[in-house]
Image: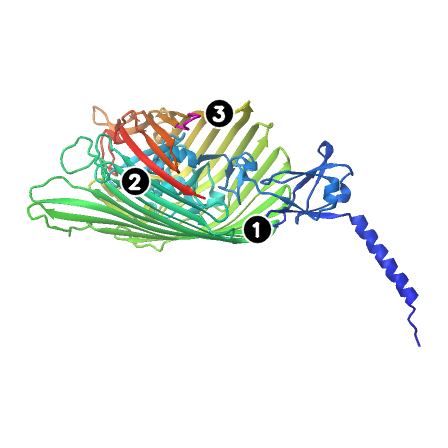
């Protein structure tokens, strides 16, 4: 019989306990670094004397045995407030809590990144227009916010009541417009671009502008860059905010109170954060413009009357490692084009736009070093043209029965993006993703088509081999149902910290832009347009190079910033207008073999406690297409710009004075024209330069009230002269519309918040 020896068992247990104790003692005390919600902070830095330290692991743990005794410890991580502790304090702790602090990041940007990132640390060159600037401009639309920005030009299509954008020498059809990172659908107008003035300026928190191709991250139409509109959201717990705005503005010297002539803005918005897990936001804006005759007699307007109703709502939920929010935006716009007088009947046209945009953003942190992000959107965009005939004698009104007098266009777009953020180490992060975009358009002016489907996978990431160097390569592989996409779309961004105050950025990117449904299948004929689509178009592709030097330094209590940017874009198969060889009365779309743009921009900002001065200049060249056949002509044609923004706030009453100014230099070009002998020769033409200046005063009052007063277009710009001949695509003449003359506004804003 086998007998159990209790003494041997006790001895064995004692030996095991001792061995475990030795192992534990050898491992040292482990402490975890977490945020205020208890989530671990990976790769936090633990630093002691003489700059020595260790890095926490992927779960935020570090061991005390590697830290010398009697040390004073600093624990830091990007986006968190630094904590200082003594080694003896750490020995009695199991966790160290770091408080989130976006102020630690300085100016924060999100475009092109997985989450908020310091603008100084970003490899992209991002321009930010914050809410304070938007409020100080008292703008009624986005064009009034952006029209004094360097490298950005606007033109007006008064036949359709829309504005057209150009950025860095490339047209607005090459600029991707995003709302909270989600692409917009519904390009309109003959220039095939998103109308920025159909976005509610009152819901905007800030605007981020990234120049240069972003095709790897955002796909087609991002050849010139992206404009990302970040919307407002609630802050704090158990908090609310209510904002109401009313503003009256003249249209030149034309105005009637509260309705009719002039511009009349009514807006209300509210946000409510019920708890740390649930928040709501909603808003409504009514923007009515009575048109502008500019001294002309009769029924017709030089700038068409327009009424807009814009609404938005969102609900956001987060719990633990999961975040989800849903948003919806609604637009209802009517533009009225009144026809000329007639003794029997008059013919008027209404352009009616309706847009619903549903967006879902989600984020799920599976572990501290691996997160998933999802974006999905559905857009229903309708553009209706109604032509009315009114009997002058009886005043009876009915829809015209003439062919093409009535038209309906309907675009439906679906976007889905899934990204992962995988932190492999403190110096290496990978971001793989998939991108799906579909767009379908039907209507009276669109020939039959099967829509456009775009599917893509991409991989980007960031590598920091040293604390001075960041490298961000990227690749995208795309398939499109309507065009042949490039086999691979590469990009490479790099940032070098030359010193504590100087940074250098360099980037290369291959861009592309898909021909849209409008360019492929859209046929548009009216008194001002004769355009036919071309289903044989191919995609535009480009190679782009960008660089920038940035400098930021604090001088006593003032901050000085300087930026020098340069770019070069080489575009192949650029889509443009040409005369239809089968019918010279019609303009159609075609692919131009080559187009280039290049330029330099410099900007300096000096900010004090009560004032700021911002001065910038740019010199942008555009390719002269006629040099392909006329080698003696200059290949690049340059246009300069100068802008200045001044702000001063009185210390006592806090009255703020703002001056926004920009000189847009002449835009030269060459055009084939008949000479005195009736022969076609290249002739130099020019769109004249002009000065634009806005002056505003913002005065905070008691109980959350703020008054805005000012003058817009103070230099009274109305039309600018063009020596180019009017083309068959657009009606027009030697004068191009730019503004409605010097206008005055008075507004009142009320904000109640807790």
> What kind of element bears circle 1?
strand
Tag 1: Cα neighbours inside 10 Å, few (<14), some, or many (≥20)?
Answer: some
**Extreme residue in the bottom direction:** 1
Crowd around label 3: few <14 · some 14–19 · many ≥20 (10 Å) = some
Q: Say which of marks 1 and 3 sits in front.
A: 3
Give the distance between the C-alpha atoms of the residues marked 1 and 3, in whole angstroms: 40 Å
Q: Is residue 406 left or right of residue 286?
A: left
Spatial CA distance of label 2 from label 3 is: 33 Å
Q: Which residues are magenta?
A: 650-655
Membership of 652 in magenta stretch: yes
- Residue 371 got which mark? 1
* Residue 339 among those drawn in magenta: no
Question: Which callout, 2 or 3, points at the residue further toward the start of the chain?
Answer: 2
- The residue under label 2 is 265
Could you tell me which residue is drawn at 33 percent across and 50 percent down?
Answer: 355
**In the structure shown, which secondary structural element does the residue marked by tag 3 occupy?**
loop
């Amino acid at each position: 019989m086998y007998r159990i020896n209790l003494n041997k068992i006790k001895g064995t247990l004692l030996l095991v306990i001792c061995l475990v104790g030795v192992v534990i003692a050898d491992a040292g005390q482990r402490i975890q670094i977490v945020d205020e919600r208890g989530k671990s902070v990976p790769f936090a830095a633990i630093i002691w004397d003489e700059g020595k330290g260790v890095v926490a692991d992927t779960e935020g743990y570090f061991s005390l045995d590697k830290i010398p005794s009697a040390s004073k410890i600093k624990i830091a991580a990007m986006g968190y407030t630094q904590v200082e502790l003594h080694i003896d304090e750490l020995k009695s702790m199991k966790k160290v809590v770091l408080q989130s602090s976006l102020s630690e990041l300085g100016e924060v940007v999100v475009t092109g990144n997985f989450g908020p990132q310091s603008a100084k640390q970003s490899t992209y060159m991002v321009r930010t227009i914050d809410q304070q600037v938007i409020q100080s401009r008292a703008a009624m639309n986005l064009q009034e916010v952006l029209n004094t920005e360097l490298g950005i030009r606007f033109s007006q299509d008064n036949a359709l009541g829309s504005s057209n954008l150009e950025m860095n020498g490339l047209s607005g059809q090459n600029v991707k417009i995003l709302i909270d990172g989600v692409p917009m659908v519904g390009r309109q107008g003959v220039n095939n671009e998103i109308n920025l003035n159909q976005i509610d300026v009152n819901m905007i928190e800030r605007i981020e502008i990234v120049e240069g191709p972003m095709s790897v991250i955002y796909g087609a139409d991002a050849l010139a860059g992206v404009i990302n509109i970040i919307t407002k959201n609630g802050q704090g717990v158990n908090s609310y905010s209510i904002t109401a705005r009313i503003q009256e503005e003249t249209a030149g010297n034309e105005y009637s109170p509260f309705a009719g002539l002039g511009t009349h803005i009514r807006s209300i918005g509210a946000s409510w954060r019920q708890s740390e897990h649930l928040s709501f936001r909603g808003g409504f804006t009514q923007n009515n413009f009575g048109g502008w005759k500019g001294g002309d007699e009769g029924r017709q307007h030089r700038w068409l009357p327009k009424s807009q109703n814009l609404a938005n709502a969102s609900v956001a939920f987060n719990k633990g490692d999961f975040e989800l929010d849903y948003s919806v935006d609604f637009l209802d716009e009517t533009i009225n084009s009144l026809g000329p007088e007639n003794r029997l009947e008059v013919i008027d046209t209404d352009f009616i736009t309706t847009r619903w945009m549903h967006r879902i953003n989600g984020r799920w942190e599976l572990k501290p070093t691996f997160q998933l992000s999802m974006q999905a959107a559905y857009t229903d965009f309708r553009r209706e043209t109604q032509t009315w005939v009114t009997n002058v004698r009886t005043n009876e009104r009915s829809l015209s029965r003439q062919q093409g007098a009535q038209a309906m266009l309907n675009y439906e777009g679906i976007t889905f993006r899934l990204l992962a953020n995988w932190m492999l180490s403190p110096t290496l992060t990978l971001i793989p993703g998939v991108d799906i975009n579909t767009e379908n358009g039907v209507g009276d002016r669109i020939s039959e088509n099967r829509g456009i489907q775009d599917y893509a996978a991409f991989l980007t990431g960031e590598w920091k081999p040293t604390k001075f160097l960041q490298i961000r390569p990227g690749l995208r592989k795309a398939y499109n149902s309507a065009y042949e996409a490039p086999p691979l779309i590469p990009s490479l961004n790099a940032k070098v910290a030359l010193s504590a105050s100087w940074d250098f950025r360099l980037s290369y990117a291959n861009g592309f832009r898909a021909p849209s449904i409008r360019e492929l299948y859209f046929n548009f004929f009216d008194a001002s347009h004769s355009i036919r689509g071309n289903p044989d178009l191919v995609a535009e592709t480009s190679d782009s190079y960008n660089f920038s030097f940035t400098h930021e330094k604090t001088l006593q209590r003032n901050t000085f910033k300087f930026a020098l940017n340069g770019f070069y874009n080489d575009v192949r198969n650029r889509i443009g207008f040409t005369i239809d060889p089968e019918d010279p009365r019609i303009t159609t779309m075609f692919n131009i073999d080559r187009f280039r743009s290049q330029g330099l921009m410099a900007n300096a900002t000096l900010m004090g406690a009560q004032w700021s001065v911002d001065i910038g200049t740019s010199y942008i060249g555009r390719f002269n297409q006629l040099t392909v056949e006329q080698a003696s002509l200059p290949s690049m044609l340059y246009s300069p710009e100068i802008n200045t923004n001044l702000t001063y706030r009185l210390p006592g009453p806090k009255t703020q004075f703002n001056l926004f100014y920009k000189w847009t230099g002449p835009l030269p070009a060459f055009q084939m024209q008949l000479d005195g002998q009736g022969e076609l020769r290249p002739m130099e033409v020019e769109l004249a330069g002009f000065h634009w200046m806005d002056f505003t005063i913002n005065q905070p009052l008691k109980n959350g009230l703020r008054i805005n007063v000012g003058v817009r277009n103070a230099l009274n710009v109305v039309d600018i002269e063009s020596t180019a001949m009017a083309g068959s695509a657009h009606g027009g003449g030697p004068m191009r519309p730019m503004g409605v003359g010097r206008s005055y506004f008075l507004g009142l804003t009320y904000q109640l918040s807790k």
